[in-house]
Amino acid sequence: MSAINTAHGVAPLIAGFSFINPQNMCLFAKEWRDGHLFINLQITAYVNYRQRLKKL
């Protein structure tokens, strides 16, 4: 994992856990999920595309 990804993951983590309450944790979880979901969707789409090419 690159330093940028680590910083991206750790900074909100520290911010989120420094004052734990359900609302802050939900906001943090949503931001983290939105950012990583986009990357995961791109990877999934690429993998599916490669698998389709193999089947042809």
Image: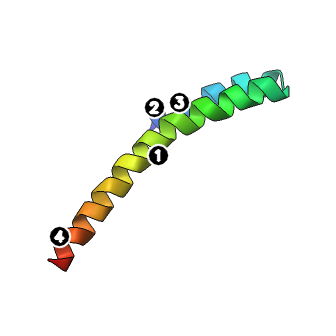
Instruction: Name the mark on residue 53.
Output: 4
Q: Secondary structure at mark 2?
A: helix
Q: Is residue 33 above or below residue 53?
A: above
Task: Identify residue type, mark 1.
Answer: Met
Along the horizontal axis of the image, is 36 left or right of 16? left
Q: Residues within 10 Å of mark 2 (few under 14, many from 20)?
A: few
Q: Secondary structure at mark 4?
A: helix
Instruction: Name the mark on residue 52.
Output: none
Q: Which residue is mark 2?
A: 4
Q: Residue at x 44, y 49 (%)?
A: 40
Q: Nearer the viewer, mark 4 or mark 1?
A: 4
| Quadrant position of residue 50 | bottom left
* Marks 1 and 2, how far apart at CA: 8 Å
| Quadrant position of residue 20 | top right
Task: Identify residue type, mark 4.
Answer: Leu
Q: Secondary structure at mark 1?
A: loop
Label 3–label 2 contact, CB within 8 A: yes
Q: Residue at x 62, y 26 (%)?
A: 11
Return the x and y of residue 21 as percentages of the image width and height: 85, 25
Return the x and y of residue 49 as percentages of the image width and height: 24, 61
Instruction: Name the mark on residue 8.
Output: 3
Residue placed most toward the observer, 3 or 48: 48
Q: Which residue is mark 1?
A: 1
* Marks 3 and 2, how far apart at CA: 6 Å
Along the horizontal axis of the image, is 25 left or right of 48? right
| Quadrant position of residue 10 | top right
Q: Which quadrant is the C terminus positioned in?
A: bottom left
